[in-house]
Image (cartoon, rainbow, N blue to C red):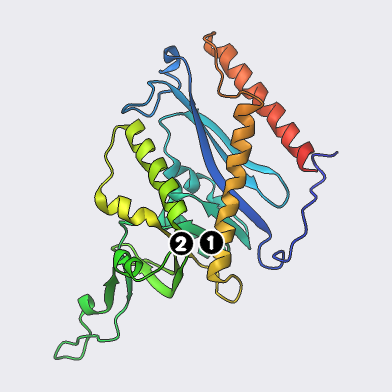
Amino acid sequence: QTITNNTCIPSVWDEHFKRIRILDSTAFQVPESYKDIYPGSGGCSQPSGVKIQLEYELKSGNLLNIQVGAGSGSDNTFGSKIRDTIKHYDLILRDLGYFNFEDFLDIEDREAFYISRLKPNIAVYIENKDIEYYKNGSPKKSSLFKRIYISDIMKQMVEGDRYEIKDVYVGKEKSLKTRLILYKSTNDQLKKRTEKSVKNAKKKGIEKSDNTIELLGISIYITNITEEVLSAKQVHEFYSLRWQVEIIFKTWKSIFSIHVVKLVKIERCKCQLYGKLILLLISSAIMFK
């Protein structure tokens, strides 16, 4: 009864967002003998691993979607698999691993909302005021949009500063019209982010380009929420709610030791894993109440 009692934490945002949905994944390695069922992500990573996709609803504490799969599974395609669960006035928070133009367009079609980071290498355009025309009066397609460069804007910003462009078109196809918000990190934030990025790159056996490292100093957000509902500062704060799911994963590992897998028969391993997930589901629901 406790678990099915769908109590929500009341908030001033209830009229705008019925649910706040945070999607993320956690992964851990398992014995190499499981690699046929749970292949790892390759590269310098372990040959065998498990990845758990989790979508958490912040206001009710419900775990909306859980999927256990191979460590080699892609985050990018999981968002598309759960499209039909999105309802009016849902707010979707996802990290860059789930970035997908089609998902954003689908969220808009369902009258829901998103806040996402934008990859620094994705082209950003604005409508061009100086449109060029052919002799017959029709506009030249190449002159309809003007590309803007985030690195140029960033150089004019001071640390902790925000910059907003209300209507931009992202990607080569310019299919997604959205609101763009830039936030320049403080020096302390940049130092931590650079250290983390270099560490992750070293772990994966890749090298970060100078341009990528330069753009670590800026957070680029896109959203279809209007300025009347959320200011640029609030968009940045709302996106930081995503860390709540990281806290859940930390609990899973530090308290429930979900990542500790001994070499046993694969059937027993699966039983232990699913048993822990059932325990986590019940525990997190009761704790939230």
Q: CA distance from mark 1 to mark 2?
A: 8 Å
Label 1 close to label 2 by CB (< 8 Å): yes
Give the x, y percent position of residue 234: 58, 66
Q: Nearer the viewer, mark 1 or mark 2?
A: 1
Q: Label 2, on which residue?
A: 221
Q: Quadrant of the C terminus?
A: top right
Does 152 sit above or below residue 68? Answer: below
74 relative to 64 in the view: left or right = left
Which residue is at a point 63% across and 63% down the rendered structure image? 89
Q: Position of residue 147 (x, y in %)?
A: 27, 71
- In the image, what residue occupies the spot 36% across and 31% down? 203
When the figure is inspected, residue 253 is found, relative to residue 193, above or below; the finding is above
- Which of the 4 quarters of the picture holds residue 91? bottom right
Say what secondary structure mark 1 lies in: helix
Residue 182 sits in quarter: bottom left
The residue that disc 1 covers is 236
Residue at 58 percent of width and 62 percent of height? 112
- The residue at the point 69 percent across, 30 percent down is 280
Say what secondary structure mark 2 lies in. strand
Q: Amino acid at mark 1?
A: His
Q: Which comes before the other along the chain, label 1 or label 2?
A: 2
- Amino acid at dot 2: Tyr
Whole-percent x, y for residue 247 in the image: 62, 40
